[in-house]
Image (spheres, rainbow, N blue to C red):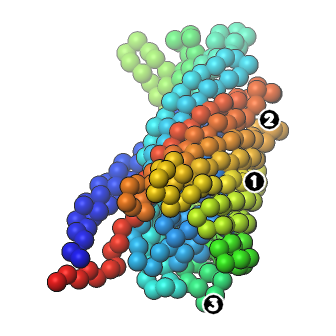
Amino acid sequence: MLKRNNALSVVMVLIICGFSGYAQNNNTTSPFSRYGLGNLHHYGYGRTAAMGGASLGSRHTVQINSANPASYNANDSLSFIFDFGIDGTLSNYKSNAGTMKANDVNFRYFSLSWPVTRWFGAGMGIQPFSDMGYEVAYSEALPGVGNAFHSYSGEGTTSKAFFGASVSPFKGLSVGANLNYIFGRLNQNTGIGFDNSNLFYISRIEGTRLRDFTLTYGLQYDLKLKRDEFLTFGLTFENQSNLTALHHVFAIKAISVSTGTLSDTLEYIPEGKDFIKLPSTFGVGLSYNKINKLEINADYYYAGWSKAVFFGKKDELITNQSRISAGFEYVPEAFSIRSYLKRIKYRAGIHQEYSYLKLNNNQIKEFGISFGAGIPFPKSKSTANFAIEFGKKGTTKDNLVRNNYTKLSLYLNLYDYWFVKRKFD
């Protein structure tokens, strides 16, 4: 047999890495991203996006599961796998004051996985950690002054690059860890003005650059039920850690006069080194797998954000985050020769999340259902994973905002044999 030429795969990896760099400027439109570090991203990507994101107990031979680093050594021992994806979100925001629609499309993530030995696997990649993107404005009438106009805007993305490995010390047990590097920039602007031009204008600019390392630990244990049936328990944990934050603030008060504009500095904090204390997190997952037929996953995830510290103080609007998710994948006939439709992997899932935001004494909740399919490539172990999610986040009670959203996702999981020595006569 002729040796397979992998030049195309190498080129694709380099192109995707370039797109990953571009992805660090995500398009985001969400009033919820005004608080904390913005909208936090869930750990579930790829095939599990259509399964409610439940993935902590999942082990797969030809798909990457970066959510639990203990899963890397489950990949085929002859494989080299890379996975990347994009998604688009259609949002419909509603409050007592009105409605707003927004559409955002972003390159979502990129990851690689490869075997080192039969009991040792490794992976690496990059994915968004949080996004910030909002514009909020309102006016109020002040007696004896007139109308005051308040404006708030922010933008930025923080990302998580990771390198991880997993080992199997004995049959059934796998342990692993991801070394994460969190980095990115968040900018927030505030303005107050008046319709009376003789009055002053206040502008405040706050910027934060993040950069530091964290560790994610993972464990998975396989319990064999029958020859082709397994029950897998998964666990992940992150300890509380300090994230280096380069933070600056600049605020001025300005007034227009006949000769121009006079301004006075109200606050000036030059960029200096500070810290954001991230919370400890843990997640548990359970997965039932009948090989090449059915997989059922369920997860619980918790992050103690109420103990997070932002520049030396706690944020009263930040509370503990938790999420429950479940989903399944079903394949009618994985190796069918006559019917392509029977080889498609059909998926569905559900999730409910209590976010880390507590606004007007209401913890912001999210609920979503998802559907999707894994479309196999002809004569290949590669797969195109499609997902659609319908969800609701927030509430219109107590002058808050509700978002009814639809998210469309496409993730390509590309499989290649990189560790086979071909021979020919």
Is 79 drawn above or below residue 89 in the view shown? below
Residue shown at 65% from the left, 47% from the top: 348
Give the secondary structure at mark 2: loop
Residue 317 can be seen in this image = no
Residue lying furthest left: 425
Residue 95 can be seen in this image = yes
Residue lying furthest right: 361
Residue 195 image offset from top left, x and y in percent:
56, 11
Give the secondary structure at mark 1: strand
- Residue 305's tag is none
Q: Which residue is mark 3?
A: 170
Label 1, residues with CA under 10 Å away: few <14, some 14-19, many ≥20: many
Residue 179 image offset from top left, x and y in percent:
52, 72
- Please, what is the three-letter code of the amino acid marked with disc 2? Asn
- Please, what is the three-letter code of the amino acid marked with disc 3? Phe
Q: Which residue is mark 2?
A: 360
Residue shown at 69% from the left, 53% from the top: 327
Image depth: mark 1 or mark 2 in front: 1
Label 3, residues with CA under 10 Å away: few <14, some 14-19, many ≥20: few
Q: Which residue is mark 1?
A: 324
Give the secondary structure at mark 3: strand
The image shows a total of numbered marks equal to 3
Inter-mark Cα distance, 2 to 3: 51 Å
Is 21 drawn above or below residue 78 in the view shown? above
Is 79 drawn above or below residue 47 in the view shown? below
Image depth: mark 2 or mark 3 in front: 3
Label 2, residues with CA under 10 Å away: few <14, some 14-19, many ≥20: few
Inter-mark Cα distance, 3 to 1: 30 Å
Between 401 and 416, the one nearer to me in the picture: 416
Residue 384 image offset from top left, x and y in percent:
45, 51
